[in-house]
Image: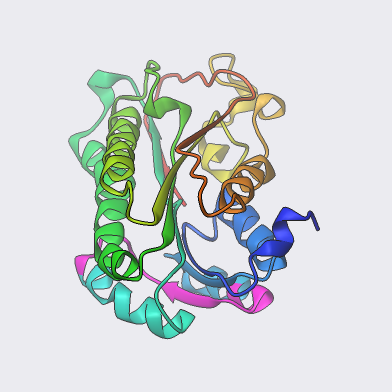
Amino acid sequence: MSEASAGFSGHRVVLTGATGGVGRAVADRLARGGARLALIARGAAELQELAERLDAAALSGDLTDRDFIAAAPGSLSDALGGTPDVVINNAGAFAVAPFVDTEPETFERMLAVNVRAPFELTRALLPDMLRRGRGHLVSVGSVAGRTAFPGNAAYSASKFGLYGLHRVLVEELRDSGLKATWIEPSAVDTPLWNPLEPDQRPDLPSRSEMLRPEAVADAIEFVLSRPENVNIEELVIRANSARVGDGERVAEE
């Protein structure tokens, strides 16, 4: 265990997309450091298994369901024993297709999962965090959130939107005692890539060229362990440039 990872004892952390590749790596890292975790994901059985292993709370639900979001402040406060100290918006959906082949339903799903859900969850939890005067909001973005790639119409639109939300939070939270951080990795080797078979396509990064989920966990651990008077607004992590290709595929975690 690193020195930084030993410093989360008692921290109340909300983590979305907890059962995905990045989510599991982050959950493992923070649990080892003593954080009290509330894990959110859609798959109840997989989520429960992870929560039991990490002695964490499990909240199974769809973040695009407004009833689920409306109940979140109370549910999370009960699960954690109080207002969250950290909210990590990590859940995401991913689609690759040429612009003209991107279905409107896919575009709407990307916006719902990648922009609206973190907006609504943060909006639901932020008032209590502001009243307390401390807390940390972490948005897990993407290289496609500030750089355009062919085939990323829906995904980039959503991640560009998430980056915009982050920048507004940074400005609005100045002098509030709260922090906001944007984590921007290049392609990460997670099951989201499985439908695309990247090792079989020259237009995509091979898995050996991708970041490991643990690299994103390292970044989140680092920003959360900074002194109270230090906020890292953006942390960019690169292995190599992500590339995209033909044929629409959608995945979520």
Q: Position of residue 223 (x, y in %)?
A: 57, 46
Magenta includes 57? Answer: yes
Q: x and y percent of residue 147 in the render? A: 40, 19
Colour scheme? rainbow
Tally the numbered discs. 0
Q: Is residue 149 left or right of residue 187?
A: left
> Is 170 in front, or is 90?
170
Residue 143 in percent (x, y) is at 47, 27
Question: Is residue 225 depicted above or below 246 in this figure?
Answer: below
Residue at 62% x, 53% y is 225
Q: Quadrant of residue 130?
A: bottom left
Figure check: 12 above or below 15: below
In the visual, does 103 lie left or right of 220?
A: left
Work out whether residue 74 or residue 94 is closer to the camera in this orientation and state it: 74
Residue 219 in the magenta stretch? The answer is: no
Image point 31% across, 73% down: which residue?
Answer: 72
Residue occupying the point 67% across, 71% down: 34
Foreground residue, 251 or 13?
Answer: 13
Left or right relative to 198: residue 32? right
Q: Where the N terminus falls, by quadrant?
A: bottom right
211 left or right of 68 in image: right
Q: State which region is magenta.
A: 51-66
For image coordinates 64% across by 79% down, the residue present is: 55
Q: Position of residue 166 (x, y in %)?
A: 33, 41
The quadrant in which residue 7 appears is bottom right
